Image: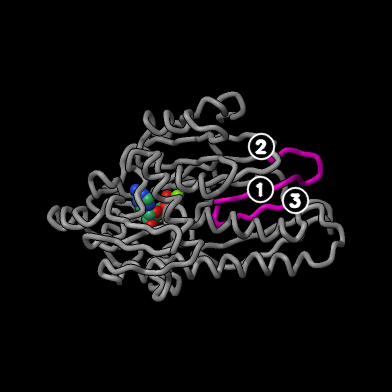
Amino acid sequence: MKRSFIKSFFPLLTLIVIIAVISSIVGKKGSAIKRTRFLMGTIVEITVFNSGKEPGIQEAIEGAFREIKRLEDMFGRRQSGSDVWKVNHSFGKDVKVSSETMDLIRAGLYFSKLSGGAFDITVGRLMELWNFEGDRRVPPSAPEIKNALSMSGSNNMLIDAEKNVISADNGVHLDLGGIAKGYIIDLAAAKLLERGIKNFIINAGGDMVIWGRKGNRAWKIGLQNPRDSQKIMAHMEVDEAHTAIVTSGDYERFFIHDGVRYHHIIDPSSGYPARGLISVTITAEDAKTADALSTAVFVLGVEKGLKLIDSLEGVEGMLVDEAQKIHLSKGIKEKVVVL
Ligand code: AMP
Ligand code: MG
């Protein structure tokens, strides 16, 4: 069955939400305002806490949803007319993009460098070939993969950051799907903060930004089993003033062929889905960082992934491997209760 949102470059509606805020979200009557909208291929829920009767909250939430829509239309690989679409249809010519797109591409290139190429915003051709949003049910042939691989690589992205001009050489196509959702919810959070809203959660299908508090309690976060959404594998308390939590998993977009799962996180060194992990949850100060790193660590695997996380200030991770064993970064070993 075709769904209208398959045009989106974001994951299909994730039925399993990996991370759940266990603390009851809506407190006493009147203390929380919650609104949901279908955006970015998922259900986006904005909840404002401790709001009392402050006027304008509803309007501020609407503003945040509008911001998400505006940016979604800018970054989608499959949205015709988006900045990314223009770059991918430019045949190497210069394309003028928005300052947000330039910002996001620069961030993408930064995380690419940081992860030694595991994170790669130039996987556009490979994603088109694998076509997880579409009808593919059999992996592509080796020559097809080789061909798509030959048209990837960050060194083919030429940017003029002052003029906001991009060009992609050698047939390279962009795909910002590994970082855009995080970046977008950060900017949606900024819209709420601008309006003086201090205590809120934006939850986009399990990818979240959390600001402030509900009452005086710390947030209790549960890690659901990637293979059984009814089971919580671990939980932890989050008491930072603000934090972002993003999960990458092999269950978001995939098909199974001959008993093998082929999913949407591609190892740029092979052109095939990354193996070893089934989910990676990252906490960081902002969702852009958490989003890029969840994808990068998924590709890097347990050993290299944890090494990268442990080298970064303010970043922690919970990794689940194929045997469903949990691996924790140094900074949260004490905080997480594995069930
Ligand atoms: P996420 O769910 O954040 O891990 O993002 C997965 C999406 O990122 C995919 O649907 C692709 O659009 C894109 N992607 C796939 N492989 C990579 C990669 N190695 N680096 C960056 N983005 C990727
Ligand atoms: Mg990501």
Q: Residue furthest left?
A: 143
Q: Nearer the viewer, residue 321 or 190?
A: 190
Q: Residue at x 84, y 66 (%)?
A: 55
Residue 173 is labelled as: none
Residue type at the position of mark 2: Val
Specify whether residue 6 is in view: no
Q: How is the image coloured?
A: one colour
Q: Is residue 236 above or below residue 54?
A: above
Residue 210 is labelled as: 1
Q: Secondary structure at mark 2?
A: strand
Quarter of the figure with residue 126: bottom left
Taking the magenta stretch, the answer to whether it contains residue 100 is: no
Specify whether residue 312 is in view: yes
Q: Is residue 46 above or below residue 210?
A: below
Q: Nearer the viewer, residue 106 or 301?
A: 106
Q: Residue at x 69, y 48 (%)?
A: 211
Position of residue 15 measured from the top left corner of the image (x, y, whole percent): 50, 57
The numbered mark, 3 or 2, whose residue comes first in the sequence reads 3
User: Are the two marked residues, 1 and 2, in contact with CB atoms closer than 8 angstroms?
Assistant: yes
Name the residue beneath numbered marker 3.
Answer: 199
Q: Is residue 191 left or right of residue 85?
A: right
Q: Nearer the viewer, residue 47 or 306?
A: 306
Taking the magenta stretch, the answer to whether it contains residue 206 is: yes
Please report the bounds of the magenta region as a residue range.
200-219
Name the residue beneath numbered marker 2.
Answer: 238
Q: Is residue 19 left or right of residue 324?
A: right
Number of other residues with Cα within 10 Å of mark 1, as a class: few under 14, some 14 to 19, many 20 or more: many
